[in-house]
Image (spheres, grey):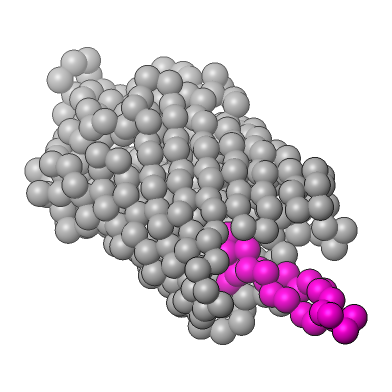
Amino acid sequence: MMKGFGANIVKHRVGFLVLAVFLGWAPGAHGQKEPQYTQYMYNIGSFNPAYVGTVETAEIIGLYRAQWIDIEGAPRTIRAGANLPFKNEVMGLGINVVSDNLGPVSQTYADVSYSYQVNLTDATKLSFGMDAGGSFLNVDFSKGTFENPGEPLNLDRINRFYATIGAGAFLYGDNWYLGASIPNFLTEGVYNDEVASVIEEKIQFNFIGGYVFNLSDDLLFKPAFLINTLSGAALNSNLSANFLISDVVTAGVSYRLDNAISGLAGIQISSGIYVGYSYDYNTNLLGEFNNGSHEIILKFYLGKGGANNNKDKKDKNDKGKTKQIDTPRFF
């Protein structure tokens, strides 16, 4: 995310000036690097590389987020990714490409993840992951009307590439998970006279967790959280509660502390396709200047299991015969 973006670089008409003010001084906004997702609970592989090998079947994910509708130059994010577990059920590979745009600044992140997991008990696994890639930064000063209240601004276009290396851990059972990750350790590599005036890189920590309650044969309930912490910025805390109905329909709400409340809904179109949608309404002063944020996620499952990554298990009844039991992961 842009460093002091509205404070010292850009005034892009009235709409963008409002956006810049909130980016420069809103709690939790300053210096936030990673793109923001409302449907983070269905998009874990984008910010935790340890997750990519824990899924039961290969997944391909597409996501589009339009933030702060009606504010000119507001963030737009497109993500394409894949979680590819190996047949040995130990290792996994992930692919992640994200395009994040804000006013005249655009960044494209691309990385490849690798994960390795071990069995702690029969019911608990711990996965470790790393990712490596890079970020392409582009600043086009021809977009909008610019104003620098201090020194003259160099209006040349900025094009820079910097490497990224991240890591994460993911601890989980059949109905719960906890995770922690750092998207990029190489924060020192982005500073130079031009880039440092536009983007601020600090080490960010992500913490996630969730638990699935089996309320009935056709109803699951999953509370979850995502916390982002960054040096010099307030905690970005997200809480959510989702229901899964008959393994087909998901519905829930999410709350971003001191920022927004969201409604979420999704449907399993077929055994291999899931589509989800969320709408954010800002609960802070920014809500007076925009019509909310929209986010759409599309997931393709390249094998058995559908949206819940169901795992077939054997269980013996009193007569010694076996039967199939579906154990939904729902994450």
Give how far across and how far down residue 328 sits, in percent: 63, 68
Q: Pick out the residue farthest to the top.
A: 151
- Residue drawn at the location 38% of the way across and 39% of the way down: 237
Please state which of residues 127 and 160 is positioned toward the viewer in this rendering. 127
Q: Is residue 27 magenta?
A: no
- Residue drawn at the location 87% of the way across and 58% of the way down: 88
Give how far across and how far down residue 72 sits, in percent: 19, 50
Give how far across and how far down residue 272 sits, in percent: 61, 79
Q: Is residue 5 visible?
A: no
| Quadrant that contains the C terminus | bottom right
Position of residue 43 relative to residue 25, above or below, is: below
Position of residue 16 relative to residue 78, above or below, is: above
- Residue drawn at the location 40% of the way across and 53% of the way down: 240
Position of residue 265 relative to residue 10, above or below, is: below
Left/right placement of residue 295 relative to residue 218 reads: left
Question: What is the magenta range?
Answer: 307-331
Res 120 → quadrant? top right
| Quadrant that contains the N terminus | top left
Res 247 → quadrant? bottom right
Please state which of residues 240 and 12 is positioned toward the viewer in this rendering. 240
Left/right placement of residue 107 relative to residue 162 reads: left
Q: Is residue 149 visible?
A: yes
Give how far across and how far down residue 101 sits, in percent: 37, 47
